[in-house]
Image: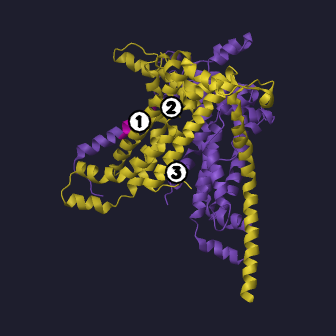
Amino acid sequence: MKSNFRMGGDVMRNRAFIRNYHIMLMPGIALLFVFSVIPMFGIVIAFQDFQPTLGIFRSEWVGWENFEYMFALPDSRVVFVNTIIIASLKIVFGMAVPFTFALLLHEVINMKFKRIVQTIVYLPHFMSWVILSGIMINLLSLDGVVNQAVHLFGGEPIMFLQSNSWFRGVLVASDVWKEFGFNTIIYVAALTSINTNLYEAAAIDGASRFQRLLYITIPSLLPTVILLATLSLGNVLNAGFEQILNLYNPIVYQTGDIIDTYVYRAGLQEIQYGLATAVGLLKSIVSFLLIAVSYVLAARFANYRIF
Amino acid sequence: MIRGTNRYADLTIYLILSVIAFLSIAPIINTLAISFSGKIPAMSGQVYFWPVDFNLSAYESILRDRSFFLSFGVSVQRVLLGGAINFIITVLMAYPLSRSAKMFPGRNIYMWFIIFCMLFSGGLIPWYMTISSLGLLNTIWALVLPTAVPIFNVILLMNFFRGIPKELEEAASMDGAGPWRMLLVIFVPISLPALATVTLFSIVGHWNAFFDGMILINHKEHWPLQTYIQQLIISVSSIMNTTDPEEIRRLTNMSSQLLNSAKVMVSMIPILLIYPFLQKYFVSGIVLGAVKE
C-alpha cells in the first residue's frame, strides 16, 4: 500500500518534470520555427514568377521554369563546377596540412615550444573573413609584401586577386592559413591517446624514429582521418561564401564564382527571387543528402554519433 | 617517450615549425607595422615587420571617425544582447535534451527537429523575406534573433550534461529539487568550463558576423563593425555607389592602406583580448564536440 502510494507520487513527479522539459524547450523551438521552418515554406518561390509586390500568395506559378532557366544559363554550369572544384581542393588541403603539422608537433618534446606554436597557429581561426581579407588585399596588392618578394626574386608583379590562374590558389591557401591550426586540434587529441608503451617497445626492438612514425603514429591516426574524410562529404558544395564574397570581383567570376555568391547576386542584387531560390534549393537538397549519407557512413563504420 | 638521438632531425622539425608559426602571423604583424607607419612608406610597400617612419596618424584619424565608433558600439551591443540570448537558449535546450528518451518521452522528436533545422535550410531569399516580413529589418533584433539558437552549442552542452554523474542528480532529487532547481543548482555550476566554451564561441560568432548586417541593415550608422569594414574597405563597389561628392572625396582621401590597416587592427582588439580565455577553453570544447559513444 505504502509502496503503491510512493509510486503514484513518482509518476506525478515525473509528469511535472516532463511538463517543465517541454516548457524549457519552447523558446528555442519557437525561434527555430520562425527563422528556420517558415523560410523552408518560402522555397515555393522557386516554382513561381515571384513579384515582391504581389507576394507569395498572388505571384504566378510557373512550375519548373526557374529550374529550366537555371540549367540553360551558361553561368550556372560555371558556378556549380567552381563550387565543387574549390570545395574539394579545400577539403584535401584542409586535411593534409593539419595532419602533417600534427605529426611534426608530435615529435616536439619541449612542451613550452609546443604550446607557443599552437597558440600562434590557432589565432587566424578566430578572425573573421572580413579582417583576413582586408589583410590579404594589402598583402597581395601590387605594392604588397608578397609582390615585393616576387620582385626580389626577379619576377614580374602578379595581380593575385585579379587573375583567373591565381585566384583559386589564393582561396585554398588562405583557407588553409585560417583553419589548419585549429584543425590540428583533433589530430593532437588523437595523438595524446597513443599508449607510450608502444614507442618504448618499438625502440627496444630497434625501430628507427621513422619506422615508429610509420608503424605506430600514422596508423593510430587513421580512424580519425577516415572519420573526418567521411564527414567532409557534406561540405562538397560549401566552397566558403564569406571568404569568396570578400575576395572576388567580376574579373575572376569565371574561376571563383560559387553557388552561394551567385544566389546572393541574382537574388538580392538583381532581384531575381525565383531563380535565386531555385538555385539555393537545389544546393540545400543536395547538401542535405550528402550530409545525411556521410552521417550514416560515419555511424556505421566509425561508430560516430553527434547526438 | 623515447626519442631518436638524431639532433639534426630534431633541429629540422623545430625549424620547420617555427617558420610555419611565423608565417601564420606574419600577415597580421605586417598589417600592425603598416598601421604605425608613415603614409608614404605604407603606400609604397616599404614596410615589412617593423614600422617605418613611426607615427600614430592613422589611429588619430580613427579617433575622429564617428561612424567607426558607432559601428563599434553596435557590435558591442550585438555581442552582449546576442550572447545573452544564445546563453539562455543553449542552457534551456541542452538540459531537457540531455535526458534519456525514457525519462523524457518526446526527446527524440525534438532532437530530430533541431538536427533537421541545422542541416536543411530554405536558402538565402526565403530567409531574408521572413525577417523582412516580420519587420525586423534595420533593427538590432535582425542580428540577434535569427541566430538565437546555436544548435552546435546546444549539442555540445547536451553531451557535457550527459557526462554528469547520475548520483548528483539522485541526491538532489531526494532533496525534492524540481527540474529548474536541478538545472540551476546542479547542472549549471558544475558545467562552467563547457558554458565558458559555448559562450566564447557565440561571442566570437557575433563579433565576426558581417553578412547579416550587410543585407538586413540599410543604415550605415546601424552597421556592426565587421559590416562597416566590409563595406568601406573591401567592397570597392560601395564607393562607386555613393553619389555624394563630399563622401567620395572623403573616401578616396581616407581609404588608404594605412588607415585600413589601423581599422583592421582596432577591430581585432576584442578577439585578442578574449584570446587567452579562448585558448584555455576551446580545446576542451572541440574535444567535447567530438564525443564518441
* Secondary structure of residue under mark 2: helix
* Mark 1 or 3, closer to the camera: 1
Q: Chain of mark 1?
A: A
- Name the residue furthest bottom: A1
Main SS of the magenta part reads helix
Please tell me which of labels 3 and 2 falls first in the chain: 2
**Most foreground residue, A237 or B41:** A237
In the figure, the shade used to draw chain A is yellow
Q: Position of residue A167 (x, y in %)?
A: 47, 22
Residue at position x 72%, y 67% in the image: B179
Label annotation for residue B28: 2
Residue at mark 2: chain: B
Towards the viewer: B190 or A67: A67
> Judging from the image, what is the letter of the chain drawn in purple?
B
Magenta residue check for B191: no
Q: Residues within 10 Å of mark 1 (few under 14, many from 20)?
A: some
Q: Is residue B224 above or below residue B47?
A: below
| Along the viewing direction, whichever of B227 and A37 lies nearer the viewer | A37
| Residue A182 appears anywhere in the view | no
Disc 1 marks a residue whose amino acid type is: Phe
Please report contact status of discs 1 and 3: CB closer than 8 Å, yes or no.
no
Three-letter residue code for mark 2: Ile
Residue marked by disc 1: A93
Tell me the subunit letter for badge 3.
B
Q: CA distance from mark 1 to mark 3?
A: 21 Å
Front label number (2 vs 1): 1
**CA–CA distance in space, label 3 to label 2:** 25 Å
**Residue A39: percent from the left, percent from the top?**
71, 38
Q: CA distance from mark 2 to mark 1?
A: 22 Å
Task: Write down the residue under mark 3.
Answer: B286
Quadrant in which residue B191 is drawn: bottom right
